Amino acid sequence: MTQSQVGIDISQGQATRPLVASVRDLKVYFEAKAGVVHAVDGVSFDIRDGETLGLVGETGCGKSVTARSFIRLVPSPPGIYAGGQIDFWSTESRRNRHEPIDLLQIPDEEMLEIRGDRIAMIFQDPGKALNPALSIRSQVAEVFYQHRSEEILEPLGENVPRLIRRAARQQTRSFERFLLNFPPWRAKAARLRMRVDELVAQALTETQIPNPRTIMASYPHELSGGMKQRVLIAQALACNPDLLIADEPTTALDVTIQARILELIAELKERLETSVLYISHDLSLVKEICDRVVVMYAGRIIETGTTEEVFRAPKHPYTRGLMAAVPSALHRRGELAAIEGTVPELIDPTPACRFNTRCPFAVEICRTVDPEVVPVGGEHTVACFAYNTGDGSVVLPTLERWVS
Amino acid sequence: MTSLTAQQRAVISVRGVEKHFPIKEGTLQREVGQVRAVDGVSFEVRPGETMGLVGESGCGKTTLGRCISGLVPPTGGKIFFRLPDEDAARLDEIDAIPEPDRTAEQRKEVERIDAKHRVDVLSGKAWRTYRRNCQIVFQDSFSSLNPRQLVKDLVGRPLQVHKLASGQELTERVVSLLESVGLGRQHLYRYPHQFSGGQRQRISIARALALDPEFIVLDEPTSALDVSVQAQILNLLHELQTERGLTYLFISHDLGVVRLMSDRIAVMYLGKVAEYGTAKELFEDPRHPYTEALLAANPDMASEESVMKGLMGTVPSPANPPEGCRFHTRCPVATPACGWEVDDAVAWLQAHETLLAGLTDVQRRSNFDATLVFQDEDSASAVGGAFQDGDLPPAMKAALEKVSTDGRSVHITFFPVEPVWLEDVGDAHLTACLLHTRQGQEPWPPQPIADSSNRTAANPSSTSTTNSNAR
């Protein structure tokens, strides 16, 4: 209860909040034998400071690709960043009133600094996201070596040998690591290790892992799914990022564990003042934890708004269909409202509403013209020619206004 | 559902089924223990109804489903197919008599019933009838459909095996099966990878329907699907059930789905049934804290203000499950009588890193009685002190019979408890929670050593809960 109330309170003053990231007309295509797959096709949305933005949609609608574009993790080839930009303001750049950086244009070296430091990601399957051959300690420590080498060198004082500096950046080669076992480096290397251990333990404690020191020494297969997800969260939040991307972090977990993980993310978000992009196909979860929602279908955004607006009065037939399809106490058996058909293929699509093949309200114009995203009051926007007014009646607004 | 009483038999009767997997170690693969995946489960599935089986991953629901469909033999207990009610009553009678006291006649009768109805000893024609009438739909349609076979072969295979159709007739039968699950003739000559997840699950269902079975085990048929597709599949399953009078065992971890689909539900935890009842009763009046916890953790779209609550801790190892109530380690309302044991004490010590540092050995005499040996006397006395004045859960503290420190070792003894059994709490609603059953009304502590006033002071929360249940 408190969680969702807090969410609503924040959303009231949200329009004035500064932006963390702004996606403009993002296009990500994939080259395939049959043609070019338009996985993400002109997506625009904003993430504001301190909010949790939910990105909802079915499998294959492009939500994960959108999220991965933030840190350029889409494999290329076959992926192509075909257009658009993702502007990103880190806390520092906002304080100094710098211009935002375009995450799609910056050089790779700069991306390396942002990835894992300013923007972090929690992946869907904790079993696959952790390296089974490395201990938990070394996997979490990597974040510190990569992004906080100055900080971990601090307690060693001035005049740190070059070899130790290299060790703190994980740039040592194997013979150099061998040398670290001997004086004069040995003592300093041990202190460096202790310092990193401390930071790792601290990061694990943040995510309420009992016995961080024991966990650090263990390997992923020794931990339960929930515990692994906590380690991933610790890893992601180690550097206190400005934006946390959570890609279905609880899909692989049991409901009882899921609730605990979501509580944890919400609590850490409040404390660290991080913005969260939460990706999920589970509407009931999004309703629970997000301040605003973006609904995607077949590579396009079809509806956005505050959680309250979207869930109280969904406008797009697809959003309505999705909500009606979630089984609840109100449904009778065999009477679930299913959206018939499947997501269309996205190979070289022609201009049309992408949902027209499955839409019960589709009319001629839906099959020939792309609908634009239009505001429908408050922060609520929708991309549909004919939308539901909420009482079930279908209203066809003046089309000229909508067609570009 | 209308013919419930008309046919005087259960489709599937599960009677005390156990499935223990051996843990083998060393070069000789010596058996060092057992994973008790399913540990004494009993229920009946009546013709035309849907029985739901819910629980977290690792609670044994899939293993039970596999036992019932005859894919793995149970290591204990019996599963019966089409057991008439009179035979069931007869078995109840005989089971009540201890094994050595049974007469030759009674033994013969058990053998007769077993040979006719018991799934793991059926043979010949009876076995084939059973295999025809019991089908299974698996969770992962990627791995349950052979990627090198055409849809025609996949769906037609059961018909070929049972020699029911061949040639043109086979094709036509397959087409009509595909049509009944919403696919068509155009899909006959395609491979599984050419279909989406929802369509593949439809193919699995068509294959299960091929032999016109009476009973289908649905093992998480929709958990890999999107909500919109899940709705399609659930509607289809319901439609098929009403058309063909099918009986389902619906296994899922999603409470919303199980609630929608099931007439009766068994909630499983760590190999045992925690609660059993009609869907309506279970959801409106849950009588087990685990069911309540599952309900609380399940986000509900319908409710305006919902609070999702998770459970502390993890599921104990099924290789060494708690002797008392299996849920007590995570239960928010656990009482001293719920079966606190040495493992709990060690788990509590583990949460306090410093205390466990010097531990060298645990000598366990039983689950309730053990000696912890430490490196030095200081750490032993620290742990002994922590047990006496530390912030132990009040229920655990009250369950501690004795703690004594002796040099480098700490002896801890808990009050031993009986296993918790399922008990009827009205209207065929069964629960295995002491707070709700007669078993929980036995006096505590079991021995007259500890005085009861101490317990009331130490554990006010548990007493208030029990009072509300007319203890």
Image (cartoon, rainbow, N blue to C red):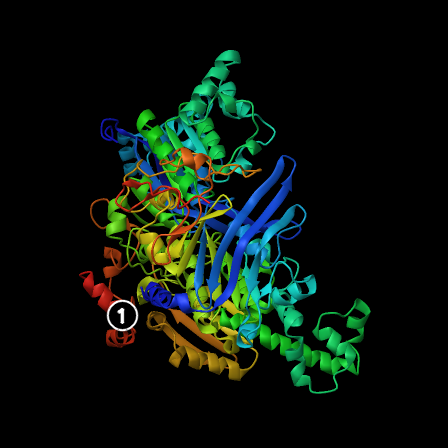
- Residue A204, horizontal then vertical, whole percent: 54, 70
Horizontal relation, residue B95 to residue B73: left or right: left
Total tally of numbered discs in the picture: 1
Horizontal relation, residue A100 to residue A302: left or right: right
- Residue B29, horizontal then vertical, whole percent: 62, 49
Amino acid type, callout 1 = Ser
Q: Residue at x 43, y 20 (%)?
A: B176
Question: Mark 1, chain letter?
Answer: B
Splitting the image into 4 quarters, where does residue A137 fall?
A: bottom right
Residue identified by numbered label 1 = B461
- Residue A401, horizontal then vertical, whole percent: 39, 46
User: Front-most of B314 and A399?
Assistant: A399
Residue sitting at the far front: A400
Q: Residue at x 41, y 68 (%)?
A: A16
Q: Residue at x 66, y 71 (%)?
A: A145
**Where B102 falls versus A227 (above or below)?**
above
Residue sitting at the far top: B168
Instruction: Specify whether residue A196 is in view.
Output: yes
